[in-house]
Image (cartoon, grey):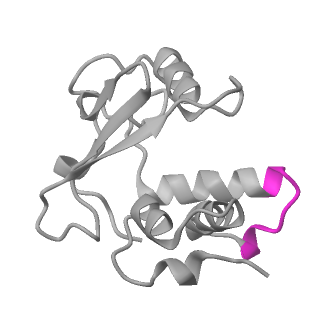
Amino acid sequence: MPSIHKSNRAMYRDISWSVEGIHFFIKRSKTDQMGKGTTICIGRTKGRHTCPVAAMEAYIECYRCSTHSTPLFHFRDGRPLTPKSFRSTFLSLVDQCGYDPAKYNTHSLHIGAATAAARVGLLIDTIQKLGRWRSKAYQTYTRIP
């Protein structure tokens, strides 16, 4: 599993807050080979338990991510979350929920998002924009029977 160079880690300074939600600057991704970065907006939703913005606010409060030099996602001891540790934690949670971890991986999150978007009838170009797909790659992630 690839490691994330220290300069590409998500930091607390990469997020800004507004009434509508969070603006999150992604420094680099596989769809951004030139490293220009992009900002994604995550809006508030109804329901405190399912709102991604409320979850981020609770996370920030719990983990005390308050300095601009703090990695945004880290363990309580300050170690940054790596792709390997994220995958391990994700699969552990899948197992704790009673599902077979062998049938899941971190791409399952992309699959779930693309499938949910398609099921509620979002247009193809909107699904592509949400997943930051420029090609028809979104089709590999959409699971509509």
Image quarter hosting the C terminus: bottom right
Would you say 20 lies left or right of 34 here? Answer: right
**Magenta stretch holds residue 33:** no
Would you say 126 lies left or right of 133 here? Answer: right
Q: Residue 144 at what x, y percent from top left?
A: 73, 78
Residue furthest to the right: 98
Above or below, 72 against 133 in this view is above
Magenta-highlighted residues? 95-103
Q: Residue 2 at what x, y percent from top left?
A: 35, 69
Would you say 125 lies left or right of 27 here? Answer: right
Would you say 28 lies left or right of 43 here? Answer: left
- Image point 54% across, 29% down: which residue? 44
> Residue 91, located in which quarter of the rendered image?
bottom right
Above or below, 42 against 124 in this view is above
Q: Residue 93 at what x, y percent from top left?
A: 72, 50
Image quarter hosting the N terminus: bottom left
- Image point 23% across, 28% down: which residue? 13
Can residue 124 be seen at all in this image of the molecule?
A: yes
- Image point 38% across, 40% down: which residue? 41
Above or below, 112 against 77 in this view is below
Can residue 78 be seen at all in this image of the molecule?
A: no
- Front residue of 4/140: it is 140
Q: Residue 59 at what x, y percent from top left?
A: 52, 25
> Residue 22, located in which quarter of the rendered image?
top left
